[in-house]
Image (cartoon, helix red, strand yellow):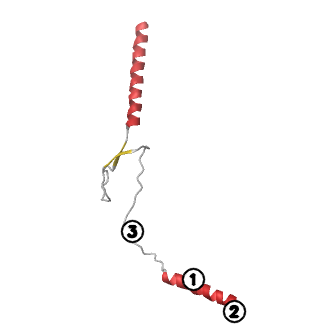
Amino acid sequence: MGITGCLILTVALITTIFYNHPSTRNATLYYRTVPIVPDINGRVAEVYIAGAGQINKGEPIFRLDSSKQEAAAETARRKIAETVAEMEVAQADV
């Protein structure tokens, strides 16, 4: 009697759970999310979009902080100027 009672209660519980929690294959997706991944890593310096509004193709969403890239570019420009100056000195010595 004990095992039979447990089996009946288990079947009744499973039936109740599946009956009260039906599933569907016809669901409507109201919001579309798209992951946004930049080409480079960095901190966000400025956000152009406020709230959850619609975004058009090609419209900027945010601006990354470019101070590290600007510093690297300035360092490269100075190295180029230094190399040009060394070449002029070498040509003068020749």
Q: Which residue is depicted at the point 57% across and 83% down?
A: 14
Of pointers 3 and 1, the one earlier in the residue sequence: 1
CA neighbours of label 3 inside 10 A, class few (<14), some (14 to 19), many (20+): few
Q: Where is residue 30 in the image (x, y as percent from the top left)?
A: 36, 68
Spot occupied by residue 86 in the image (x, y as percentages of width and height): 42, 15
Q: Residue at x 65, y 87 (%)?
A: 6
Q: Quadrant of residue 39?
A: top left
Residue at label 2? Answer: 1
Q: Nearer the viewer, residue 93 or 30?
A: 30
Residue at the extreme bottom of the image, as rendered: 1
**In the image shown, does 17 or 93 lie closer to the viewer?**
17
Residue position for label 3: 29
Give the foreground label among 3 and 1.
1
User: Mark 2 belongs to which amino acid?
Assistant: Met
Instruction: State which mark lies toward you, 1 or 2.
Output: 2
Q: Is residue 79 above or below residue 60?
A: above
Residue visible at 40% across and 8% down? 92
Residue type (three-letter) at the residue carrying disc 3: Leu
In the image, what residue type sits under mark 1?
Ile
The residue beneath circle 1 is 14
Specify which label sits upstream in the sequence, 3 or 2.
2
Above or below, 88 against 61 in this view is above
- The answer to which of 77 and 26 lies nearer the viewer is 77
Q: Which of marks 1 and 2 is nearer the N terminus?
A: 2
Determine whether the residue tagged by mark 2 lies in a helix, strand or loop: loop
Q: Is mark 1 on a helix, strand or loop?
A: helix
| Cα–Cα span, label 3 and label 2 | 49 Å
Residue 58 lies, in percent from the top left, at 31, 50
Question: In terms of secondary structure, where does tag 3 sit?
Answer: loop
Question: Vertically, is 38 above or below 16?
Answer: above
